[in-house]
Amino acid sequence: MISWDTCKEDFRRDGSLRDIYVTPASLGDWRAIYPLFRRQSDIEFLTETGVLEIPENLDVSFFADVRPTLRFRVDGVLVVFHFFTPDEIECDIDPREVTCQAQLDSLLAFVRQLGDLTHKQAVLTPENLREEPIISYDPKGKTFKYHSVPKPPEPPHPHSGNSGK
């Protein structure tokens, strides 16, 4: 898998979430991962009317009328799934909750399950940046890849260079 030391800066507090995507997706892909949700002991199925029991099966109304969210924890990390469209599987995490190698390993094992169940690439990205993966999982090769995220350049130090004298 990926070393915590390699990617821990990508989980630092910056005020944004991290997203996990499987895209393009289909209703069939959602149905392939739905049993994974149902196996979670602490799952919450939330709608505008409150927390409900998770339905036995995924329903197309999730993407139109109901628009629920599903929440559960993976080794202490809250994972929140959104039913925006059947064409994209999207969930988010708070990066502050991933604090060590064990939690990263559990999160990546979960990402692997998403990729293996859908037979599609799964990516962990900065919030709303699906085209800029931090980590990707390829189910064909059963491999993870860390993508070095470009860091903004450091501003010049105010006391370096010419002092003006």
Image (cartoon, rainbow, N blue to C red):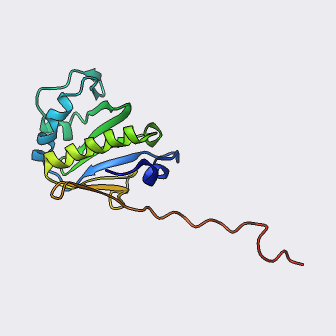
Please tell me which residue lies in front, 114 or 60: 114
The answer to whether residue 13 is left or right of residue 95 is right
Q: Position of residue 119 (x, y in %)?
A: 13, 52
Q: Position of residue 116 (x, y in %)?
A: 16, 48
Q: Position of residue 92 (x, y in %)?
A: 35, 42
Q: Residue at x 35, y 48 (%)?
A: 19
Please tell me which residue lies in front, 128 or 111: 111
Please tell me which residue lies in front, 107 or 20: 107
87 above or below 37?
Answer: below
Q: Residue at x 21, y 45 (%)?
A: 114
The answer to whether residue 134 is left or right of residue 22 is right
The answer to whether residue 26 is left or right of residue 52 is left
Q: Position of residue 53 (x, y in %)?
A: 21, 21
Residue 28 visible in the picture: yes
138 above or below 90?
Answer: below
Residue 64 visible in the picture: no
Which of the 4 quarters of the picture holds residue 78? top left
23 above or below 160?
Answer: above
Q: Residue at x 18, y 52 (%)?
A: 87
Which of the 4 quarters of the picture holds residue 93? top left
Q: Residue at x 90, y 78 (%)?
A: 165
Residue furthest toward the right?
165
